[in-house]
Structure formats: C-alpha cells, structure tokens
Image (tube, rainbow, N blue to C red):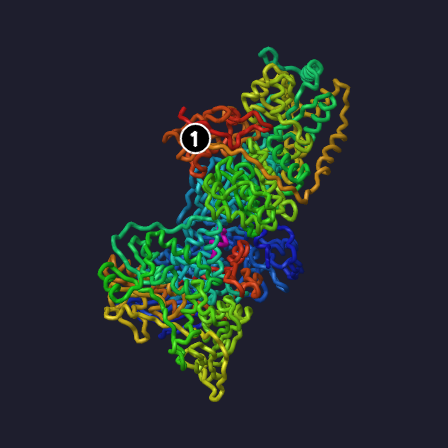
C-alpha cells in the first residue's frame, strides 16, 4: 500500500521519518520497521497485517507474564490477527482488537504492554484498508522479520545488559539470580558497580519522575551480597573444549572480558600482562578509595578459575607478538592507553623531579608508594576523572595544598559530577580558566608553574566553547609536584612490522562491529581502539570480540549478529526523551548509599562509598518502570 | 525515607511526616511513604484488588487497583504508588471501570467452570470481584487450552490447579519473601507462563495455599469439606511449639477440617490439626491390676488414687506434667497435690528450659529474661543457634524479614545447612558438640577487644580452625560482626541444652550476650523450643525437679508412685531408665490414648484434648496466649481440674477456682523485662572426639500419634518418619536403606538418607513420627536426656 511512516505525532506518506539505514546487512534491504511508537513501511511488498501479527507474536514471546493485560491480552490480539490472516475475520474483530489494544496500552505494568499496542493501533488507523482487504481475502504473504527487545537503559549501555531484568530480580529478593543475569554479559560486576559512568542512569525514565534508578548501586549490591553471604559464584557451564588457543595481550577490562567469555565457550586462553597484577587501568588508574583492590582481584581470580592463565610481568614486544601469531589461533589486543598526552609547555621534556604524568602518578600510588615524597604541594592539570583521582589521592598521601588547574570552567569538566563534588568537599582548590605555559625549576626540581588566564571563545567541534589565552595575564603558582592529567595516548610499538593497521590517531584500526583488525587472526578492543574511553565500553568490546573470535575460529568468518545490527540501528533512535511526561506520580525518592564524611575520608584510602543496604536495594528496585520497548525490521 | 515498602506488618512508622491527600473528594492524612491503597483503606474507601496481599510487597500484576491521579493522563496502580502532599485521586470512573472489567475478562478466558466443586467457592476473590464489578460477558476467545495438571504437588495435601490459576503471583512471592524457600517459580513467558513447583525445596508450610486468592492452590488434609457458610471458625492457639501462633480452626459437624490464619504458619500448625478430633480416644477410666486392664467408674478410679496416696504416702509420689498443659491445669495439679503432701514435681518442659534458665541465673542473676521475640524484628544482628526450620518455622520467617527489612546480619551456628544458611553472613557449620570451640574463641577474642584480658581461655585460632574446619575468614568475620553489632538478638533452640555440655553451652551463649550487650541495648536472648507451654510450666514449678531425677528416685525406690499428666514419657525419656523406674510402681496417667506409658498405668483417667479445653499458655515472648475450646468436651472426658478436685476432696481439700485464676495472673506479673549487665562466665567444656549425633524434630506433640498409630495423617506428611541424615562419607556401604545406630547409650535401627547438608562425622537424627527409637539412644545420667552431641560408637548395616 505504498510508503508510510508514522512515529510520535508525525505521519508522512512518500518519505521516511526514522533514522534507519538502507540495508540491514550488505545486500539485505530494510523493507519496514515497527517499534514502540509507530512504524515505517518502505517497500510495497510488506503486508502490514502480517507485520502486525509477527510483532504481536514476538511480544507474546517476550511478555514476562507478570501482569494480566499484557500476558493474556496480547495472546488474544495474536489470535484475532491470525483469524484475520486466515480470511476468517469480521469487521467487529477490528473494533474488538482496537478496544483490547487500548486497554493493554493503558493498564499494563511495564513498557512491553504499554508500548507494543501503539504501532498496531496506528496501523489500524492509518492503514485500515489493508486490514479491510485482509478481512475479505486473508493474507498470503508471510514476511521475514528480526525482532529486538530493548529499553532506554539497555540501549545506552555499551554492553546492553538486561537492566530491567536484573533490577527486578533484586526487587524479588533473588540477588543471586540478578548477578547471574549481569554475568551473562559482564564479568566485572563488582568493579563496574563501583566505577561505571552509568550511561544507563542518564537514560533512565525514572529521572523524569524523581531521579534515575540507582542501577549502578544495585549492580554493586548484588555483587557484594555474594561476597557477604559466602555464596558460590554461579557461572554458565564451560562448554566442551574446542581445541583452539587464543592469546590476549593485556589483563585490563577488555582483555579479562574477552578471556572470560572465550573460556566459557571452551577455548584455551592465555593472557599476557605487563604488570604484576590484573586489571589494567581499572587497577592502576582508579584509586583504592573508589575501587578496593580485593574486588578486582576476586573477579580476576574467578576468571582464572574458568581455566584462563595469566602470565604476569610479561611485556609483549615485536618479537613476542610474532611468536604469538605463530603459536595461537587468534589474538586479542587489549593494551589500553597507557601513555600520557603532553601539555606542550616549556620544560615538559626536561624530566624534572616532581614532574609526574598522571597515569604514572596513579600507578605509583596504587602500588602503595609515594611518587615523590620530597614534594608537599601539588598542582594537577586537567578536568577528567584521572585528574580527580590525582588530586584526591594527593590529599590522602598528606600532600598540601592540592590544587587543580583547568583551562575551562567547572561546568565543562568532563569528570563525574560526584567526583568533583567529593573533591571539593575534601579540600581540593580549584582554579578554573587557566593553563600552564612554562615549568619553573631549580636544580632540576620543580619549583613553580607559570600559568596564563583563559577565556571562553567560540565553540569548537565538540560543541564546547574554546578556551583562549588572555594576553599578558601570566602568573606564577609555586609547587613541588606538577601532574599533567589531560589525556592518555595509545602506545603500540609491538605492532610495528605486523599486518595490523594503525589509524591516523595512533589507535588499532578495527571493524566497528566485529572488532577484527586488518589481520583476520587479530582482534582488538577497548582504549587501544577507541582512545581513552569508559570501562564498560572496554568490557563490552571484550565480550563481543570473544563472540566474533568464536565465529571466526568455528566458521572462518567473523560476522556481526542480528542482535548487534539491531542495536546499531537503535543507537540512532532517541529511546530516552527528556521532555516526556512520564505518567507516574513522584513519591519515592532515590535511595542514597552511605558515604564517608569528607573529614574522615580524606585521610585514608578506605572505600568512600559504602553501598546500599539490603532494604534500600529492594526499595530502589521497586522504582524501576521496566521500560521495555520492542523493535522489529522486515527484511 | 519510606520504610513502608519494606514493612509488611502494617506497624506504625516512626519519624515519618504526615501527608494530606484527597481520595474521591475525601481528605485523608497518612504518613509519607505509604501507598494510595493504604490511604484509601484508612479513609474507608474500597479499591478492588486481587494480587495485593498485606504481608507481601506490592505485586501489581492484576491491574485492578488502577486509579486516576489528577495531573496524570494515564491511570496508575494504587498498590504501589506512594502518596504525595496535595494529591487528588479518583477511584471510580468510566475509564477505570472499563479497564478493571477488561482485566477480569482476560483472566476469565478459559477459566474452568469449577465453582460448584472448587474448594474456594463462596470465599473466592475472583468470584467476589466478578460479582462486584459486574462482568457478565466474555468477548474474547483463546484457542489454546490449559491443562488441569497432576494430583497434588510436593505433598499430597497441597494441590495446584494450573487451569484455574490466574498468575496473580502471590504464591510465588510468598514462597520467596516470607519463607525464602523459593519452591515456586514462574516458568515460560506470555500466555504459556506457568507456576512451576520445585518439590525438593518445598517446606510444606502451606503459605502458598493461605495466600492464594482463588482455588488455584488448595489443601485437602481431610476428606470432609464445607462451604464457608456451613462451617464455623473457632479461634484458639496452636500447641505445636513455643511460639504459640494464633489460629482459627474450621469446624464442621463437630470435626476440625482445617486451619486458617491471617499470619504466617508452619506446616505443623496448618496441616497438623487432626489430633484435635481425637477419634480413637479412650473415654472410660481404666485400672490395671495383675496384667488385666478393666474399665472402672470415675469414682472407683479416684478412690484407688486416694488409697494409693495414703498407703504409699504422698511424699513418696512424684508428678510429671506434660509441656503442653495449660497454666490452669498445671496450677490445679500443683495446688492440690502439694497440699496433699506430694513434693517431687517436674515437667518434661524442664528438658527444654532447665539448662537455659540455669545458665541465665548464673550469668545474669535473674530467673527469666522476660524479653519478647518482637525485639528480633528490630535487631541489626541475629545470632542463631538452631535451625528453626523444623521446629519454629514462623520465627525463621521473622528472622528472614529482619534480614531484609533492617539489613540485619545473621550468624548461624548449626551443624546442618538450612535455608537461612543462604542468607547468613557467617554460617558456622560445626559438628554437633564443637559449638563450644567456636563460642569459646569468640568470647575470648571479643573479651580482649572489650579490654577483658583475663578471658584468655586457651582457645587458639589454629586449634579451632583445625577441629572445626572453618576458614579463618569466616571466624574473623563473625568476630567483626559481633563487635560492630549495636542491637544483637540471640536465639537459642532448646535442643542445644540436651547435651552433657548443654549447660556450659548455654552459659557460653549468655556470656557472649553479655559481651555484646544483648540484654542491655540489644535485642535480648531468647529461648525457643518444641513445647507450647514450656515457659509457662517452668514459671509454675519454678523449674521444679527434673523428670529424670524423679525417674531415678523411682528406680531406687525413694519414690514409689508417679502421676503423669498429658505426656507419654516413652517418647521423651530414656527408655531403659523409664522401664526400670516404672517397674512395680503405682503409675497414674491422665491422657487421651492408651499409649505405651498409659499401658503401664495402674490408673488411667481419660482427659481432654487440646481442642476441648480453655486455658492459657505462656509463649517464648513471655506473652499470655489463650487456649479456647473448639469443640464441646466429650461428656466422659475428665478435665484435670475435676480430677484434682475429686482427689483433693478425699483429703478434705476444697479448691477455690478464683485462687487458681489469681495464681495464673500472678505468674507473668512476677516476670520483669530484664535489662541489665551480666557477669562474664568463662565456660568449660568437655570436648570429645569422633562422630557425634544431633537431633531435629524430636519432641513432637505425642497426641499426633506414631508411625504405628497415626492419629494425625497431616503430621505424617509434614514431619514424616524418623530417619538418619548421613553424609555419604559416613555411610558404611553404598545403597543401604537402613542402619543400626550404636550410640553411647544404646542402639536403634533407623532408615537412612544420604545428605550433603550435614557434615561428615555429625549425622542428624530427624526423629519424626517414631520417637521411640530416639529414646533408645538417649543418655540418662543427667538432668536432661542427652541426645545432642552424644558419641556414636558405630553405624553398621542391619
């Protein structure tokens, strides 16, 4: 019946409104799309009635069964649609269907029931003729469809964890089950439950009621509960050995993740790690007061229990890399971004005492050492989480005064808001709109830094206003220690002379969906591919790469799955609408975990955030709205 | 912060500010954190619900409680939406009516037309709602039908009807939130979703049956059935354990046909009620002479008793009271027989209370703690010695609720892995008899932290680890938790007292309590056990004499006569001692049946059943609970009061019932809530090597019968027959079904069950309905029968 696109308030004929690509896979066009707020038909060969039935059948399959209207109502809708397709439908069936769908939409408990009737209702409204035709003749064409169930939080999460499911398990007091669901896609729940930047919470619809659900705290809660109650961790069964070996370079989040999922699939995995403990940037970059080492150690130990071997103190150089290519069936590179970006100021390359790049500064501290015990005062340059870690750990070492210098304003700082607030509470001095120009040293020791004031000019490519130096506004700040923490660099000396292509930015070049490099045997993910990025993305990449390596080793070819392709399409959709008026009266405030007072915590490396207590976790889980939404393409 | 969504007892919320809202134009004031549904209830406005249950967190599956809130386009469910200041709610409207009816129509699709045969007919929420909301047509059709399903689930008395089930999910939530058994789960998605029963996890407590709003989970303990308008419901209390839960007995045609309760119950209380209908009871006084038993008149029997008292001399008579007699019954006996001149009085309840109260006196200098188990609900640490699952399940539910509601921690010290072990922060699984090692070490270390250096008792950590095989982290963890606890509650099962080390163990628990401040700011130290009135009888007799001591005196001849009221000592006392004690003695038994003890009686008086009397129990919370008659007593059954009055009359005694009444009232007045310091008593234990036995479910109400004389089939299913739970390593040969257990004091033959939940070297004697076998291995030399941590000589094939 031609092209029709309806979504939200808009209805267009002859032109599409949805951000859909042409093809699902190379050579496979997307003929139509159906989702939680409407549908778009691009190809006349798609029969809307058949598509509605396929949609309803998928919804029935995914309906959790925990409320009457959705569980039974969508089944009735399927049967009515089936009847229509068989040519046995009557006019009153259409009215019945409409009435039923409206009831399901208005009375269901969660997103599945609340949104799945909408596209069918719109189809009945805007493509009534197709239904009328089916009443008379039935429908013979049966299309081919791919369905994906998602939610704003699931979509935002780089690992696409089934968040509403694991949150509901907490509500039902099934904490082990919650952890099991998380572990289907993430092997570092305790770690991420403490440090994840939580894109999910930024996309949580409950934000529009009182505040987002504390998804990260709940993840941490169930991970910790297993430890408190001495429960045996439950993993999926390790599959039968495949007889193939995979080498992983780097025991950071990406490497550990890849190893975990490959081991579960039955592969022999060896990780080669430069340092003497696992964790990568999570271990050496994140201070103990945010992530106590035992948590990460335990999660790495659980991975080792699956049969993964970690070879510590093993640096992989060019020669070793070539050896690995010979000895192993596939390689995953997860070396992260270990180098520091230079500030570009005079005196930077002089190696003065007291000048310590951020990553190295934190590494030393995380090993329990004072990076420069002679020095007392500290200036840290930067505005990200690494800079926050540097200033807060400096306080805990007893350094004073501890100052942060950032070239833009507080509002533009990329660090987590809670990190900034906690640093302010602990007594860090913030100096905004200034930037170093020169390091002043005496007898090869840092004595002071010359800074210049900045002002915000026109916005740059990222949309933030460019800082410009104000001429003649130089001033000097005395300090013993200067820590640049303005960014990290990827260092890949071992790939020289290999088939693995390196991008212009100095990162490993990979296919964005398969994580395969230009050498088909070699895969890579995490910071060494994206540049410095968030932990969860590295962990997600590790898992996906494992599945791709598995496909490569079993079928000879690494190809993205239908689920990955659907998720990629959905990334362009705005599942979270900050302007939506969520139909839930506010009344239950977000639970806050117990956090140590600034005066107590600034002196120790004890964990600052103590997590939620059991009744808090259950109450918090009750707030989740289960915003599941379906999406389906016709191929 | 709204606590309410974690509280299920509807109790008052402290420190919450009040919120004003309007429902249907009516103003309501209620605490912040409560739901619209609760506010409506307070205002007396009815909102229809099906899946909502007071004791569960809101489920929101039925969607019937939808209401309209001003300012919001879509209706919201009242059961889980919190109130807000100034909210305006409408509970009735055409839209709401349509949506509610729609929900009902959907669940009525393929709902079988079972009302005439369904047990819930007349008391079915679905019937009520369809009637109330006026659903009179079914416009929807679904071809797929639902199976009726097999007969019975888990136990033959609980039946699930999948075709009736509307998946309100109450049963799953109850099995999850209340008992934590998690025996029910939702399987499948969409229309095909079903309740799946995991039989091996079922506790047979019947919680699912009690919460089911319709006839999808039913119980069929007895054959007789009655509609709600045909039967009566009589309030009384359960007599199976010292928690003494309030119950309603369903009575039809003079028979008890079921039990109901708004609160939690256990399987014993819910299914084990048929002994209230004693069918094969005796209704004629008997006398046994020269091996013959003949029926006599009551007068004759009384005369024989009076004669014996005079001839033998009252000071040469002993009295043993059963632990489930009412206070009034106990007081009558005490009043009359003391005045007649009998001095040696005891109760089998002493077995359960003696060691505990003696220890309490030692450490705290008072007779009774006088604390309530309600305090457990406010604890931040529960220290539990006992499984609770078998004997006092309802308390296990309270403990569980405290863990989830308060975030309280749990330290569990018990040989067998039980449900609560899953939620324990420290599950100290030690072999029976090794508890002293752990307690001793904890006392020593905790004492050091409190600055009491002199407590060094030689409990070396390595030694404790070596003997108990507990990891160091767990022991140190327990120590940390104990030192951090601000409101610890200690719960002790009386079974721990039944050991040669029992007294010392109790003292150790008390001392640990002292170091934690349990009796000061803490949540008390509590005793729970298997007999309903054990605390009450202990108060009446001020402990009294141990029945074992009485038996020993009978054996030696210092006593020549014995009164036993409402107990069968052959199920509770060491067999050998008992048989020797009763040889040629004048035994008077007041009871219902001719059990093994009554058969040896010279005089047998037929007594009242628990369902026929009126009186009081004192429970583990020192609360007074009223026993009310469910049936009118049989004419020929003789109340203890009558028996005692008649006996006393022969000695010129006249009993004033008012005096008994006042004595009953005085009992609790004499108990104060003890809140104070105690002294630290360094316990000394005798540790033995080798395998040791422990017991569960050992002291059931003997009126439920035995495996040979089953009086209560309900109990047979719940409790089952006795068996030995044995770790596979301890089994002498594979595939054995029966073993001979040779203990330190005797031997017996038992069915065996392999179990990984018990540690190797510490089998569990789960007594069940053949209690006699336990008495064959009981130790007889102490004040209490030794069954806990008694040595096992060998286990061999029969």
Judged from this view, the residue extending furthest toward the front is A443
Q: Is residue A477 above or below residue B738?
A: below
Residue A596 sits in which quadrant? bottom right
Q: Is residue A382 among what the camera can see?
A: no
Tell me residue B672's x, y (percent): 70, 41
Q: Is residue A13 left or right of residue B554?
A: left
**Is-magenta flag for residue A171?**
yes
Tell me residue A477's x, y (percent): 50, 80
The secondary structure making up most of the magenta span is helix
Q: Is residue A556 above or below residue B455?
A: below
Q: Is residue A66 left or right of residue B45?
A: left
Please provide the residue range marked out in magenta: A167-173
Q: Nearer the viewer, residue B739 or A454?
A: A454
Residue, x 24% and y 66% (percent of image)?
Answer: A519
Number of on-image labels: 1
Residue, x 30% and y 53% (percent of image)?
Answer: A266
Tell me residue A556's x, y (percent): 23, 60
User: Can you identify the residue that label 1 sits on?
Assistant: B752
Judged from this view, the residue extending furthest toward the bottom is A472
Residue B703 sits in which quadrant? top right
Tell me residue A23's x, y (percent): 30, 69
Q: Is residue A63 above or below residue B538?
A: below
Q: Secondary structure at mark 1?
A: strand
Callout 1: residue from which chain? Answer: B
Q: Is residue A567 among what the camera can see?
A: yes
Q: The C terminus of chain A lies in which quarter of the figure?
A: bottom left
**Is-magenta flag for residue B317?**
no
Mark 1 burial class by Cα count in 10 Å: few <14, some 14-19, many 20+: many
């Amino acid at each position: 019946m031609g092209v029709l696109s309806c979504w939200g308030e808009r209805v267009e004929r002859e032109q599409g409104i949805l951000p859909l690509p042409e093809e699902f896979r190379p050579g496979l066009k997307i003929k139509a799309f159906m989702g939680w707020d409407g549908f778009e038909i691009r190809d006349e060969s798609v029969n809307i009635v058949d598509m509605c039935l396929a949609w309803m059948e998928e919804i029935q399959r995914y309906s959790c069964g925990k409320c009457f209207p959705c569980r039974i109502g969508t089944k009735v809708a399927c049967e009515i649609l089936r009847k229509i397709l068989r040519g046995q439908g009557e006019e009153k069936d259409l009215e019945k269907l409409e009435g039923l769908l409206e009831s399901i939409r208005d009375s269901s408990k969660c997103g599945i029931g609340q949104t799945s009737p909408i596209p069918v209702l719109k189809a009945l409204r805007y493509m009534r003729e197709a239904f009328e035709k089916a009443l008379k003749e039935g429908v013979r064409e049966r299309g081919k469809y791919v369905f994906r169930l998602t939610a704003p939080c699931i979509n935002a999460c780089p690992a696409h964890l089934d968040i509403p499911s694991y949150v509901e398990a907490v509500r039902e007091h099934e904490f082990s089950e919650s952890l099991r669901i998380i572990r289907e896609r993430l092997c570092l729940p305790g770690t991420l439950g403490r440090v994840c930047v939580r894109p999910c919470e930024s996309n949580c619809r409950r934000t529009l009621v009182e505040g987002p659900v504390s998804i990260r705290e709940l993840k941490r809660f169930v991970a910790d509960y297993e430890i408190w109650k001495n429960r045996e961790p439950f993993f999926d069964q390790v599959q039968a050995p495949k007889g193939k070996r995979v080498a992983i370079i780097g025991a950071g989040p990406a490497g550990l993740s890849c190893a975990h999922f490959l081991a579960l699939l039955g592969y022999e995995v060896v990780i080669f790690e430069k340092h003497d403990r696992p964790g990568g940037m999570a271990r050496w970059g994140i201070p103990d007061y945010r992530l106590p080492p035992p948590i990460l150690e335990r999660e790495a130990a659980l991975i080792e229990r699956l049969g993964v071997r970690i070879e510590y103190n093993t640096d992989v150089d060019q020669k070793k890399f070539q050896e690995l290519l010979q000895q192993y069936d596939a390689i995953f590179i997860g070396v992260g971004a270990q180098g520091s970006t230079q500030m570009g100021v005079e005196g930077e390359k002089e190696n003065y005492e007291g000048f310590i790049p951020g990553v190295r500064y934190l590494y030393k501290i995380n090993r329990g050492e004072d990076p420069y015990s002679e020095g007392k005062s500290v200036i840290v340059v930067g505005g990200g989480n690494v800079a926050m870690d540097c200033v807060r750990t400096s306080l805990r070492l007893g350094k004073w005064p501890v100052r942060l210098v950032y070239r833009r304003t507080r509002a533009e700082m990329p660090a987590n808001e809670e990190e900034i607030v906690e640093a302010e509470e602990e007594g860090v001095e913030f100096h905004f709109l200034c930037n170093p120009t020169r390091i002043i040293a005496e007898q090869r020791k840092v004595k002071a830094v010359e800074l210049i004031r900045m002002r915000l000019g026109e916005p740059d490519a990222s949309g933030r206003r460019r800082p410009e130096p104000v001429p003649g506004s130089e001033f000097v700040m005395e300090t013993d220690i200067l820590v640049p923490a303005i960014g990290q660099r990827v260092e890949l000396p071992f790939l020289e002379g290999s088939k693995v292509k390196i991008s212009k930015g100095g990162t490993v070049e990979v296919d964005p969906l398969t994580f395969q490099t230009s050498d088909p045997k070699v895969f890579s993910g995490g910071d060494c591919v994206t540049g410095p990025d968030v932990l969860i993305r590295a962990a997600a990449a590790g898992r996906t790469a494992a599945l791709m390596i598995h496909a490569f080793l079993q079928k000879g070819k690494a190809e993205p799955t239908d689920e990955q392709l659907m998720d990629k399409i959905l990334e362009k959709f705005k599942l979270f609408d900050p302007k939506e008026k969520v139909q839930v009266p506010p009344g239950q405030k977000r639970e806050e975990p117990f956090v140590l007072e600034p005066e107590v915590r600034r002196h120790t490396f004890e964990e600052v955030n103590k997590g939620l207590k059991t009744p808090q976790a259950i109450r918090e889980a009750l707030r989740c709205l289960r915003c599941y939404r379906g999406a389906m393409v016709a191929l | 912060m709204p606590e309410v969504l974690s509280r299920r007892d509807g109790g008052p919320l402290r420190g919450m500010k009040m919120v004003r809202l309007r429902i249907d134009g009516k103003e309501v004031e209620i605490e912040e954190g409560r739901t619209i549904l609760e506010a409506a209830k307070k205002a007396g406005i009815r909102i229809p619900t099906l899946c909502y249950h007071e004791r569960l967190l809101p489920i929101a599956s039925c969607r019937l409680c939808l209401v309209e809130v001003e300012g919001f386009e879509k209706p919201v469910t009242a059961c889980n939406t919190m109130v807000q200041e100034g909210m305006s709610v409408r509970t009735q409207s055409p839209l709401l009516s349509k949506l509610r009816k729609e929900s009902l129509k959907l669940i009525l699709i393929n709902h079988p037309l079972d009302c005439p045969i369904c047990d819930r007919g007349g008391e079915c929420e679905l019937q009520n709602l369809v009637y109330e909301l006026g659903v009179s047509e079914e416009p929807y059709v679904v071809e797929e039908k639902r199976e009726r399903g097999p007969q019975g689930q888990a136990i033959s008395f609980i039946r699930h009807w999948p075709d009736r089930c509307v998946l309100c999910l109450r049963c799953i939530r109850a099995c999850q939130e209340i008992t934590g058994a998690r025996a029910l789960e939702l399987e499948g998605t969409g229309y095909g979703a079903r309740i799946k029963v995991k039989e091996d996890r079922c506790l047979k407590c019947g919680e699912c049956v009690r919460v089911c709003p319709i006839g999808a989970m039913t119980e069929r303990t007895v054959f007789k059935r009655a509609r709600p308008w045909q039967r009566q419901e009589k309030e009384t209390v359960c007599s199976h354990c010292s928690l003494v839960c309030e119950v309603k007995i369903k009575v039809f045609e003079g028979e008890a046909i079921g039990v109901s309760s708004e609160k939690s119950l256990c399987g014993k209380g819910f299914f084990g009620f048929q002994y209230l209908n004693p069918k094969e009871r005796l209704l004629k006084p008997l006398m046994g002479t020269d091996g013959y038993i003949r029926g006599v008149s009551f007068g004759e029997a009384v005369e024989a008793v009076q004669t014996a008292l005079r001839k033998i001399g009252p000071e040469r008579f002993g009295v043993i009271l059963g632990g489930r007699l009412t206070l009034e019954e106990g007081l009558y006996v005490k009043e009359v027989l003391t005045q007649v001149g009998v001095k040696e009085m005891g109760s089998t309840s002493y077995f359960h209370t003696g060691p505990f109260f003696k220890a309490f006196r030692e450490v705290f200098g008072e007779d009774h703690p006088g604390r309530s188990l309600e305090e457990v609900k406010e604890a931040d640490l529960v220290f539990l010695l006992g499984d609770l699952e078998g004997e006092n399940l309802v308390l296990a539910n309270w403990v569980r609720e405290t863990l989830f509601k308060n975030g309280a921690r749990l330290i569990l010290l018990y040989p067998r892995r039980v449900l609560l072990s899953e939620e324990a922060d420290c599950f100290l699984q030690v072999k029976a008899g090794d508890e002293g090692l752990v307690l001793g070490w904890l006392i020593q270390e905790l004492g050091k932290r409190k600055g009491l250096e002199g407590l060094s008792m030689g409990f070396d950590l390595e030694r404790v680890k070596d003997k108990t095989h507990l990891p160091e982290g767990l022991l140190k963890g327990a120590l940390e938790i104990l030192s951090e606890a601000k409101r610890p509650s200690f719960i002790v099962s009386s079974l721990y007292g039944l050991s040669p080390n029992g007294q010392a163990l109790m003292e150790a628990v008390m001392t640990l309590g002292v170091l934690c401040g349990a009796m000061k700011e803490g949540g008390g130290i509590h005793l729970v056990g298997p007999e309903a009135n054990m605390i009450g009888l202990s108060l009446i007799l001020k402990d009294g004499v141990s029945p074992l001591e009485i038996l020993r005196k009978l054996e030696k001849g210092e006593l020549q006569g014995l009164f036993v009221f409402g107990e069968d000592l052959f199920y509770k006392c060491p067999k050998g001692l008992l048989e020797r004690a009763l040889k040629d003695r004048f035994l008077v038994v007041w009871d219902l049946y001719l059990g093994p003890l009554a058969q040896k009686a010279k005089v047998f008086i037929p007594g009242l059943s628990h369902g026929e009397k009126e009186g009081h129990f004192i429970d583990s919370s020192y609360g007074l609970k009223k026993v009310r008659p469910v049936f009118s007593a049989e004419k020929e059954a003789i109340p203890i009061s009558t028996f005692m009055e008649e006996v006393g009359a022969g000695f010129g005694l006249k009993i004033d019932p008012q005096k008994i009444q006042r004595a009953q009232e005085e009992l609790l007045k004499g108990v104060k809530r003890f809140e104070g310091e105690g002294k630290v008593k360094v316990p000394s234990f005798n540790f033995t090597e080798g395998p040791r036995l422990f017991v569960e479910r050992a002291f059931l109400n003997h009126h439920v019968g035995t495996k040979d004389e089953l009086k209560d089939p309900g109990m047979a299913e719940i409790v089952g027959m006795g068996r030995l739970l044995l770790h596979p390593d301890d089994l002498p040969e594979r595939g054995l079904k029966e073993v001979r257990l040779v203990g330190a004091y005797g031997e017996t033959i038992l069915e065996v069950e392999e179990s990984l939940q018990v540690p190797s070297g510490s089998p569990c004697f789960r007594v069940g309905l053949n209690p006699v076998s336990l008495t064959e291995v009981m130790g007889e030399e102490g004040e209490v029968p030794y069954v806990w941590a008694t040595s096992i000589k060998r286990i061999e094939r029969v």
